[in-house]
């Protein structure tokens, strides 16, 4: 029995001596000897002289051991909004009644409603397309009719038109280049007083700012129009013939128009323009059934807000037969909106 106890005691002592003689195993995470003096001197997990916790050599021990961890991102948190780009003042596509060489900016909405003392009510709605074009639908009270040469001219309304314009913005190609637009306006067919009428206008106009206080507009128009009676012919009689403006001399179709703007105050402008409007005479000879009448307008535009402008002035329908009783005082309100543009920019 004493001999067995001695063997066991010798075995235990021998094993302990062998274990004490072995080197300390390395830390599998850091490669440093576990329990070394350096490790005990740096409880944060770093090695002596090798940096602080969280360095590339020492991983973050995590929240359970007193370390730090990244805060998870909230997938439903609102995205930070970048400040909206500064909106430049809009150059209007019309002076008062005549087009300008300026286009609406891309995706900008434009709406104008007018009322005058002659009982005319008009509306003009447009949208800018890519800074190079615009499309619009409008009603106009500028188209007139008379039954005989001596009768008083009356307006035909509502007269609905659609328009498309394209062009180049001012200073886009080179410094000092005026804004240039090529526009086409065409009416829907209108049946009125037993007559079927249509109009069309092709315009080319240039506009140029003269400093920050004035601007000038100059253009040319090629007009066309048609007139045809809707009366049912008697038996044996031919159908009513369609009369067109292009069926006569081309000089009757080409007209020059223009306008001028002055801005004496930052939010107020004085406007004047000279344009043309078609007139139908049902009882005149064929060569005089369709005429173009000169029209003079002057007035002011006031900026109530960046999105709203008020315009008022005087319009003389036919300055060739100047009559103050035919002059009309009109008022217009114009709204512009960048809402569609902002929605498009948010998709980018």
Image (cartoon, rainbow, N blue to C red):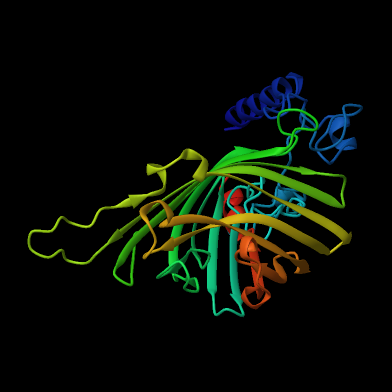
- Eyeballing the image, is 208 above or below 143? above
305 vs 17, nearest the viewer: 305
Spot occupied by residue 172 in the image (x, y as percentages of width and height): 71, 33
Q: Is residue 28 visible?
A: yes
Corner quadrant of residue 112: bottom right
Spot occupied by residue 69 in the image (x, y as percentages of width and height): 71, 48
Spot occupied by residue 40 in the image (x, y as percentages of width and height): 86, 36
Residue at point 55% right, 80% down? 119
Q: Quadrant of the C terminus?
A: top right
321 lies left or right of 281: right
Tell which residue pokes out farthest to the left in this image.
235
Corner quadrant of residue 158: bottom left
287 vs 268, nearest the viewer: 287
Q: Quadrant of the N terminus?
A: top right
- Eyeballing the image, is 132 above or below 241? above
Corner quadrant of residue 109: bottom right
- Eyeballing the image, is 302 above or below 177? below
Q: Is residue 67 visible?
A: no
Residue at point 21% right, 67% down? 231
Spot occupied by residue 208 in the image (x, y as percentages of width and height): 76, 42
Residue at point 16% right, 66% down? 232
Q: How many labels does the image show?
A: 0
96 lies left or right of 139: right
């Amino acid at each position: 029995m004493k001999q067995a106890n001695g063997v066991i005691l010798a075995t235990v002592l021998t094993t302990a001596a062998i274990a004490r003689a072995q080197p300390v195993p390395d830390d599998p995470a850091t490669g440093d000897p576990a329990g070394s003096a350096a490790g005990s001197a740096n409880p944060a997990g770093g090695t002596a002289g090798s940096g602080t916790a969280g360095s590339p050599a020492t991983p973050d021990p995590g929240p359970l051991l007193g370390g730090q961890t990244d805060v998870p991102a909230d997938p439903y948190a609102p995205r930070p909004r970048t400040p909206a780009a500064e909106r430049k003042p809009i150059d209007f596509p019309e002076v008062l009644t005549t087009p300008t060489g300026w286009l609406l900016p891309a995706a900008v909405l434009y709406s104008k409603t007018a009322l005058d003392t002659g009982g005319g009510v008009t509306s003009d709605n447009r949208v800018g397309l890519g800074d190079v074009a615009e499309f619009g639908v409008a009603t106009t009270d500028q188209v007139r009719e008379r039954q005989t040469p001596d009768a008083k001219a009356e307006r035909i309304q509502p007269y609905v038109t659609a328009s498309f314009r394209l062009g180049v913005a001012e200073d886009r190609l080179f410094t000092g280049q005026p804004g240039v637009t090529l526009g086409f306006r065409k009416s829907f067919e209108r049946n009125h007083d037993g007559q079927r009428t249509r109009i069309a206008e092709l315009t080319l106009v240039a506009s140029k700012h003269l400093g920050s206080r004035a601007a000038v507009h100059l253009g040319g128009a090629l007009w066309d129009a048609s007139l045809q009676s809707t009366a049912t012919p008697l038996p044996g009689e031919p159908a009513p013939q369609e009369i067109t403006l292009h069926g006569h001399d081309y000089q009757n179709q080409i007209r020059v128009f223009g306008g001028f703007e002055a801005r004496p105050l930052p939010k107020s402008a004085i406007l004047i323009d000279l344009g043309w409007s078609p007139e139908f005479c049902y009882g005149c000879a064929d060569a005089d059934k369709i005429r173009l009448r000169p029209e003079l307008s002057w007035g002011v535009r006031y900026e109530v807000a960046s999105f709203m402008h008020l315009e008022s002035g005087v319009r003389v329908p036919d300055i060739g037969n100047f009559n103050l009783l035919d002059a009309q005082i009109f008022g217009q309100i114009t709204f512009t909106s960048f809402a569609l543009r902002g929605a498009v920019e948010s998709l980018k």
